[in-house]
Image (cartoon, grey):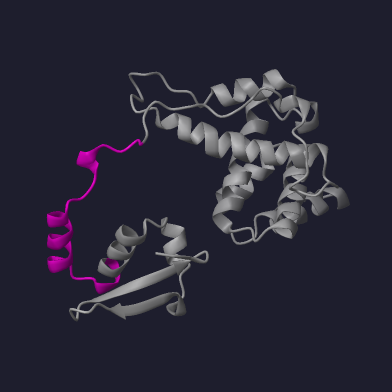
């Protein structure tokens, strides 16, 4: 029988708090980041919870990126990483032209990697500063977003036509999914924005010709 030390028990408790409500694989991601980096990830998640209304999706995304960064450099301490370490990690997201002709990897690179890592390293080097006032650390100097030639990764043929919508709404049996589809189309909201809507956020209106429509209020924006 093996007994865990008090420090090991504390680490386990911290990781459980960090991953509370998420699936087991997220817990394993944090545990696999190495003891020191695991605790840093836990501290950062706790800090973000204090500073913002942290959703499970955002928390899972942060944990995934930071855990991958740690594993990529074999659990090298975050505070010991240099600019070339960050650049090498970000380059791992690049894809060749023949594999990704629409350059979708750039969206992942810019949003998931640049945004997440920038906020993290600002906190790591300046945890006591106001989140909006934290300066960009030297480790991220001259590292910025990439521009993509395409305005969108979607082709016109990827989008449904009005005829497609009409067929779906006429024959699909689930009223719930038909409602979701039309709300998504009319508002252009992301799935998690729609699923967070409350009954009071949907306001039904009537046109002068008697036809009905609904307005969805999401994040104080009216569509």
Quarter holding residue 186: bottom left
Residue 47 seen from this side: yes
Segment colored magenta: 152-177
Identity of the residue drawn at 62% across and 40% down? 116
Give the camera-side residue of 53 and 174.
53
The quarter in which the C terminus is drawn is: bottom left
Magenta: main secondary structure = helix
Instruction: Tell whether position 80 is magenta.
Output: no
Identity of the residue drawn at 63% across and 45% down? 63
Give the camera-side residue of 223 and 111.
223
Q: Position of residue 183 (x, y in %)?
A: 33, 65
Give the camera-side residue of 1 and 34.
34
Vertical side of 33 occupied by 84: above or below: above
Vertical side of 41 occupied by 196: above or below: below
Q: How many marks?
A: 0
Q: Is residue 80 left or right of residue 178?
A: right
Q: Is residue 79 left or right of residue 149?
A: right
Q: Is residue 25 left or right of residue 102?
A: right
Instruction: Tell whether position 175 is magenta.
Output: yes
Identity of the residue drawn at 12% across and 56% down? 163
Q: Position of residue 172 (x, y in %)?
A: 17, 66
Residue 3 seen from this side: no
Vertical side of 174 occupied by 140: above or below: above
Q: Position of residue 215 (x, y in %)?
A: 37, 71
Q: Position of residue 4 (x, y in %)?
A: 81, 50
């Amino acid at each position: 029988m093996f007994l865990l030390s008090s420090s090991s028990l504390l680490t386990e408790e911290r990781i459980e708090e960090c991953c509370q409500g998420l699936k087991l694989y997220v817990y394993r991601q944090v545990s696999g980041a190495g003891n020191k980096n695991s605790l840093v990830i836990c501290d950062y998640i706790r800090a973000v919870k204090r500073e913002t209304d942290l959703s499970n999706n955002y928390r899972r995304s942060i944990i995934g990126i930071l855990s991958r960064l740690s594993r990529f450099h074999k659990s090298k301490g975050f505070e010991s990483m240099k600019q070339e370490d960050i650049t090498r990690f970000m380059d791992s997201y690049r894809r060749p032209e023949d594999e990704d002709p629409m350059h979708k990897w750039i969206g992942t690179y810019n949003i998931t990697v640049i945004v997440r890592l920038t906020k993290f390293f600002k906190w790591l080097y300046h945890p006591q500063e106001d989140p909006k006032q934290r300066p960009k650390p030297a480790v991220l100097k001259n590292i910025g977003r990439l521009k993509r030639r395409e305005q969108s990764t979607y082709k016109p043929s990827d989008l449904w036509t009005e005829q497609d919508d009409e067929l779906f709404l006429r024959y699909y049996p689930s009223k719930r999914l038909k409602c979701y589809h039309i709300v998504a189309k009319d508002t252009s909201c992301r799935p998690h924005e729609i699923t967070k809507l409350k009954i009071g956020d949907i306001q039904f209106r009537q046109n002068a010709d008697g036809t009905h429509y609904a307005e969805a209020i999401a994040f104080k924006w009216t569509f």
